[in-house]
Image (tube, rainbow, N blue to C red):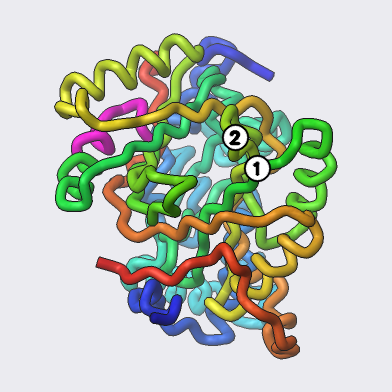
Amino acid sequence: MSNMELNKHVLQITAEDRALIKFVEQGLPIVSRPYAEIAKQLNTTEQDVIARMQQLIDKGAIKRYGVVVRHKELGYTANGMVVWNVPDERVEELGICIGKYDCVTLSYRRPRRLPEWPYNLFTMVHGSSREEVEHKVAEITQNCFLQDIDHTILFSTRRFKQRGASYAAHTAKETVKPQVKKPATRLHLVKK
Amino acid sequence: MANSINDYSPLEQHLLNDFQRDLTLSTTPFADMAKQLNVSEQEVLQAIQSLQQRGVISRVGPVFRPNRIGVSTLAAMAIPQDKLECVARIISAFPEVNHNYEREHEYNLWFVVTASSEEHLDIVLYEIEQHAEFPLMSLPMLDDYFIDLGFQLKEAN
């Protein structure tokens, strides 16, 4: 099974869109006419940039469009990645239940890596202190009926890097295509 | 670094709270915000620049949906404490890496790797392992159960 199976939802992105993404993923220029500014850099028109941004939104490439805050600077100093070992048939139900809480910002199913990594549901819980995060996790455990589900909280102690994803980074490298073997730890999984 | 929502002016609080999604695709998005808040465009631009300089806002723009325009994975490594900072620095230097955190666990270094294609991602993961000299556990997202409405500051309003 190839990793490509994981990516059946990946959109076909043109080279022009890729160039646009490279600009906007770093954020809009904070000027009166940001799209005109981007258009200048890309040698196109303001209307073309706006139309292609609209297409990316319509195609579901963009999850959210607006002000991206860094939660830590806003007083949410504690964040715990809470990982749960959920029976496969209940992941979706519990992932949705946990994801509904205000203090939760992510709820993903990921593969287990047995024996060293049994957890398959990843949620991010934020609070103003470690105790608050623990309290919220206890509340979620109760309300979503997770008492019998093994979980652990991985608190972050240091942030080495936080910024938006760079999908356009180093695209030139792809044309080189060096012969490499895949990392041994990378398993191949099927999307449900 | 501010610790309370009260450290922000009312305009800043609104900018932080009210515009995390559905930014208008008009030619003048910041003037649109200004109009909604009854202030001048110049005030909005200055406030956003200031929040950005203080590191409160990382940017104004799109958050791309995982695995739609590219591929990504969550990677974890177990690094001895005395080597952690050095390895973290090596990993953060990759442009494909973001959200690189130390976490309290045997797997103590967690970061996201994104790339424009599966092939590119495999190459980067391989290169990270080579440079870091530690094995990498890759945990790609299989399903997303969270509807992103932004990150709301309840104390405001």
Q: Residue A111's x, y, as percent?
A: 38, 56
Element type at mark 1: loop
Q: Tell me if residue A117 comes above or below residue A101 in the rendering.
A: below
Q: How far apart, in angstroms, are the residues tagged by discs 2 and 1?
A: 6 Å
Q: Is residue A155 above or below residue B6?
A: below
Residue B46 appearing in the image? no
Instruction: Depth check: give the residue in front, A129 or A50.
Output: A129
Nearest the eye: B19 or A93: A93
Q: Dot 2 lies on which element?
A: loop
Amino acid of disc 2? Glu
Image quarter in which the C terminus of chain A is found? bottom left
Which mark, residue B78? 1
- Which residue: 56% across, 20% down? A77
Instruction: Where is residue B1? Give x, y as percent.
Output: 69, 19
Residue drawn at 25 percent across, 42 percent down: A86
Which of A17 and B45 lies nearest the eye of the viewer?
Answer: A17
Left/right placement of residue B113 relative to residue A93 reads: right
Q: Quadrant of the N terminus of chain A?
A: bottom left
- Mark closer to the chain start, 2 or 1: 1
Q: Position of residue A27 (x, y in %)?
A: 60, 54
Disc number placed over residue B106 in the picture, else none: 2
Q: In the image, is residue B134 above or below residue B7? A: below
Q: Which residues are magenta?
A: A97-104
Whether pointer 2 and pointer 1 mark residues with C-beta atoms closer than 8 Å, the reply is yes
Q: Residue at x 83, y 32 (%)?
A: B82
Crowd tier of the residue under label 1, counting other residues whose Cα lies within 10 Å: few below 14, some 14–19, many 20 or above? some
